């Protein structure tokens, strides 16, 4: 049996230290140790993207990373996206364009879109669809999600 | 979906990783991006007692070009490979193939070394490495060993890599006239059939070619019949003829719910033609 491992991860700008079992997945560390339950577990098989967070700025399925691998890294979750009461343009876009129905996929969808718009601030519709292809939504048929990301891209280009 | 308990060690250098591998023996596994290993551990198809994290090692990173030879460190992610200006200019097949692996999150974590060492029968990069006649660099307790890609891939999930060795990188000659075409499984983007073609062209005539398939069979392998038929062929017009027997020549063909053996054989010829045409169009 393995000994607990000390880790320190900067989560949403705050250093969080803990002793964890090496097999603890990052998503469980976020949800159960830090109570950051905005990051969802959907399929738990690296397919659906509901658990997507930014790990050192890159979209990552947190069900497929051990918390120990993120030791010393920066993690951003959906809870860290808004600036106080002001929604991030992507959160605003999902609100304005009705980019969700049940909302289960939304945190992961938004975190993927953050990475997408950082790499490509003015994506075409096809590029948006490819960019979120690691995130599965069972409600919307994706059209409103695409609209939401376009809305955010336009707003971010103006500011 | 909780893996069995294991000990985790983050190696500070390749040398330390090698000694940890020796210490751990058959219980030890290397971890970089973890996007093949961790899903297997969650299903308890793999239950290593020791995980040695080499993902952040600078020694395994970088993309260099020197006198027409390109070297990629094993820990480079698919996203980094896809974004590399050197690869886009000098070996676009590699950047394009990496850009179409899985999805964005998978590309942000998965590494070239991990993909090659794991050798999933549907992985894209093995076929590209075989077509480019790449050399895979391995480091073990007795020093470095270099293996040609076509000899490295041996069977399903089986490569010429000893328990105490680490894949440190790959190198190959720059090549513009090469392309990869795949029929992908829509959800995973793994190749049901993927063909990589690297051509030597003299005007519209192919002087020699290396063509390799993945997804169709147990492991990435050359399509020597197609290569032979391409020698002296005029392209792109001669691509269909050269590719026509590609699928029938395979000894063993995978069969699953995504595609029958017959379908994969037929698609091998189709995607061989598309890869050859795309490569010829690039010169």
Image (cartoon, coloured by chain):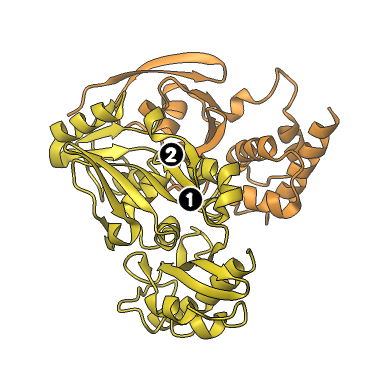
Chain colours: A orange, B yellow
Q: Residue at x 54, y 74 (%)?
A: B206
Give the letter of the chain under mark 2: A
Count residues near mark 2 (Cα–Cα under 10 Å), then give few for <14, some for 14-19, many for 20+.
many
For the residue labelled by badge 2, is the local secondary structure a helix, a strand or a loop? Answer: helix
| Placement of B94 over or under A111, stated as above or below | below
Q: Which residue is mark 1?
A: A47
Answer yes or no: is residue B84 visible. Answer: no
Of residues B194 and B26, the one drawn nearer to the viewer in this rendering = B194
Q: Residue at x 46, y 29 (%)?
A: A31
Answer yes or no: is residue B19 visible. Answer: yes
Give percent across and percent down for residue A37.
52, 30
For the residue labelled by badge 1, is the local secondary structure a helix, a strand or a loop? Answer: loop
Q: Are marks 1 and 2 in contact (CB under 8 Å)?
A: no
Q: Which residue is mark 2?
A: A63
Give percent across and percent down for residue A77.
56, 28
Name the quarter where the C terminus of chain A is drawn.
top right
Give percent across and percent down for residue B145.
24, 45
Give the letter of the chain under mark 1: A
For the view shown, which residue lies furthest in the right direction? A158
């Amino acid at each position: 049996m393995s000994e607990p491992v000390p880790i320190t991860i900067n989560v949403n700008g705050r250093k969080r230290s803990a002793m964890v079992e090496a097999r603890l997945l990052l998503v469980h560390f976020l949800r159960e140790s830090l109570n950051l339950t905005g990051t969802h577990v959907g399929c738990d098989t690296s397919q659906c993207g509901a658990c997507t967070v930014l790990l050192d700025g890159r979209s990552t399925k947190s069900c497929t990373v051990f918390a120990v691998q993120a030791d010393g890294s920066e993690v951003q979750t959906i809870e860290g996206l808004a600036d106080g009461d002001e929604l991030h343009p992507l959160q605003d876009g999902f609100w304005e364009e009705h980019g969700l129905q049940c909302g289960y996929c939304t945190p992961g969808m938004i975190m993927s879109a953050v990475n997408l718009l950082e790499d490509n601030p003015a994506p075409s519709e096809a590029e948006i669809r490819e960019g979120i292809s690691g995130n599965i939504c069972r409600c919307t048929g994706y059209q409103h999600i695409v609209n939401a990301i376009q809305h955010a891209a336009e707003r971010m280009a103006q500011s | 979906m909780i893996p069995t308990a294991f000990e985790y060690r983050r190696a500070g250098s390749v040398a330390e990783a090698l000694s940890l591998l020796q210490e751990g023996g058959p219980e030890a596994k290397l971890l970089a991006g973890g996007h093949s290993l961790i899903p297997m551990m969650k299903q308890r198809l793999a239950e290593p007692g020791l995980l040695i994290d080499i993902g952040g090692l600078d020694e395994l990173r970088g993309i260099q070009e020197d006198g027409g030879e390109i070297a990629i460190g094993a820990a480079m992610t698919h996203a980094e490979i896809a974004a590399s200006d050197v690869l886009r200019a000098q070996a676009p097949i590699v950047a394009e193939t990496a850009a179409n692996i899985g999805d964005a999150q998978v590309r942000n974590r998965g590494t070239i070394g991990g993909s090659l060492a794991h050798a999933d029968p549907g992985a894209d990069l093995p076929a590209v490495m075989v077509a480019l006649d790449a050399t895979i660099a391995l480091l073990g307790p007795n020093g470095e060993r270099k293996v040609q890609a076509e000899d490295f891939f041996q069977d399903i999930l089986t490569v010429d890599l000893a328990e105490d060795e680490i894949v440190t990188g790959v190198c190959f000659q720059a090549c513009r006239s090469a392309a990869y075409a795949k029929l992908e499984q829509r959800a995973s983007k793994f190749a049901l059939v993927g063909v990589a073609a690297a051509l030597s062209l003299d005007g519209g005539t192919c002087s020699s070619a290396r063509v390799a398939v993945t997804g169709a069979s147990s492991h990435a392998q050359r399509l020597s019949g197609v290569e032979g038929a391409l020698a002296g062929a005029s392209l792109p017009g001669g691509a269909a003829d050269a590719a026509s027997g590609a699928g029938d020549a395979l000894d063993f063909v995978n069969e699953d719910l995504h595609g029958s053996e017959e379908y994969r054989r037929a698609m091998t010829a189709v995607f061989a033609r598309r890869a050859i045409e795309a490569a010829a169009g690039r010169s």
